[in-house]
Amino acid sequence: MNEKLCLEITLPSHLADLPIRIIRGSKDKELICSLQSENDQIRYSNGEEQKYVFVWRQNDYLKLMLDEILWIEAEESHSKLYLTNNRNMVISFNLATIEKELPNVDFLRIHRSYIINLKHVISLIGNSLNIEGKLITIGRGYREKLLDRFIFLGVRRKNK
């Protein structure tokens, strides 16, 4: 039977203009899709996204799971990564550079000085959010984009 097969990929609207590269794998059902843009570097291999990054320390690269990153704070030309288990590390990249490399699915810039991991947000309190007991200020220009990422049950006033 010479039946034509069709691959259909549905992307969210903010990824609609993204170039898509499809690579046929060596196995019959293996498929690797790579989606890349300047602000969205999402890498899928058989449907799974990248779950770690390698961060340069003094003389080696440390494998760091993305879920370990709570938030990132700007410190002049460097950035400080706040990690689980009360760990932190300083890296020599500014927030703009880091923001381009992290997946927008989990990470969001909420202030000119902060990028947060959405998975670790405990609560929203006024113009701040709580991650592991630390209140982080939400910048006025970033607030709506942040609030659009959550589902709210109950009362939520729109600030317009």
Image: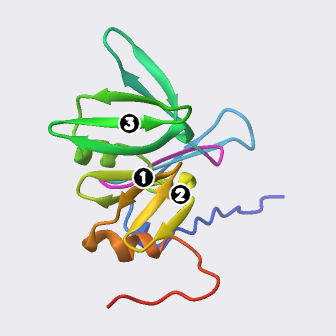
Position of the C terminus by quadrant? bottom left
What secondary structure is marked by label 1?
Answer: strand
Q: Which residue is mark 1?
A: 116
Position of the N terminus by quadrant? bottom right
- Three-letter code, disc 1: Ile
- Three-letter code, disc 2: Val
Q: Residues within 10 Å of mark 2 (few under 14, many from 20)?
A: some
Is 30 or 42 nearer to us in this picture?
A: 42
The location of residue 113, given as percent across then percent down, is: 25, 52
Q: Earlier in the sequence, mark 3 or mark 1?
A: 3
- Report the residue at 23% width, 48% height from top: 96
* Among the 4 quarters of the image, the one containing residue 9: bottom right
Q: Which residue is mark 3?
A: 81
154 left or right, relative to 20: right
* Residues rendered magenta in the picture: 38-48
Q: Is residue 81 above or below residue 129?
A: above
User: Residues at badges 2 and 1 in contact (C-beta under 8 Å)?
Assistant: yes
Query: Disc 3 to disc 1, how far (Cα)?
Result: 10 Å
Do we see residue 2 in this rendering?
Answer: yes
